[in-house]
Image (cartoon, rainbow, N blue to C red):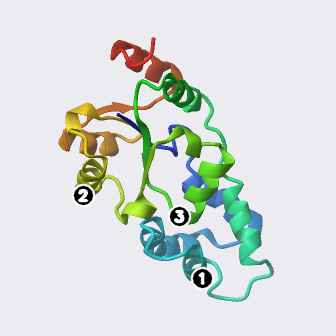
Amino acid sequence: MILFDIGGVLLTNGWDNRERALVLDQFGLDRVDFEARHREAYGDWERGLVPVESYLDQTVFHEPRSFTRQEFFAAMRSQSKLLPNGALGILREVAASHRYTVGALNNEACETNEFRFDHFGLRPLFQAALSSCYLHLRKPDPAIYLLALDILGRPAHRILFIDDRAMNTAAAEAAGMKAIRFEDADGLRRDLEALGVIY
């Protein structure tokens, strides 16, 4: 089985530092104040413990605004784009081969996760969606890898995990999985060819 991260591997990170800065500037919000509130609120949202409305209430709409929650969330969603030299083409190739079960193991809040899966046509490519918002755990917490193994019912050494962050691949390896740190599509293709995953 092959598990793909999404942000930083297939797509841009939908709500990382750069994306947040662009949206905050668009709406004229104070970055320092927002980031302090974001740090307190984001973990629960990304683990699926609160809905987007709660996250936005804590970070943006704690005071009256000249724009709506819908407008702000639309701007958040617009930051999700195809990753230049990303692995979406490789994912499609692997999925189309029908040689492997393919899934996602990613950190993402529910509302943005659903949007990204649908908007970029990811849902038909995955047989499993092990997202932080569904599992209520986030990488690199060792517990998320152990829970993923329990759900998948596969031995760890039979799972290959692809992620762009070293701490996440290291945690997967500590759980017994094989792991590749993604840097670009060309490098990933070479790594997968070396493993005999693609030809």
Q: Earlier in the sequence, mark 3 or mark 2?
A: 3
Q: Earlier in the sequence, mark 2 or mark 1?
A: 1
Residue 25 showing in the rendered view: no
Callout 1: helix, strand or loop? helix
Residue at 58%, 73% in the rendered image:
52
Going by the image, does 112 lie left or right of 47?
right
Residue 186 percent coordinates (x, y): 51, 19
Q: Vertical placement of 78 versus 181: above or below?
A: below
Q: Vertical placement of 77 versus 197: above or below?
A: below
Dot 2 and dot 1 residues touching (CB under 8 Å): no
Q: Quadrant of the N terminus?
A: top left
Callout 2: helix, strand or loop? helix
As drawn, the residue found furthest toward the right would be: 66
What amino acid is at disc 2? Ala
> Which residue is labeled 2 in the image?
143
> Which residue is labeled 3 in the image?
110
As drawn, the residue found furthest toward the bottom would be: 63
What amino acid is at disc 1? Asp
What amino acid is at disc 3? Cys
Spatial CA span between label 3 and label 2: 19 Å
Q: Name the front one of labels 1 and 3.
A: 3
Res 57 label: 1
Residue 106 percent coordinates (x, y): 44, 50
Q: Earlier in the sequence, mark 1 or mark 3?
A: 1
Residue 34 percent coordinates (x, y): 57, 73
Residue 22 showing in the rendered view: yes
Residue at 57%, 77% in the rendered image:
59
Residue at 19%, 42% in the rendered image:
174
Q: Assess disc 2: are there few (<14), some (14-19) or many (≥20) residues with their C-alpha within 10 Å of its C-alpha.
A: some
Residue sitting nearer the eye, 30 or 1: 1
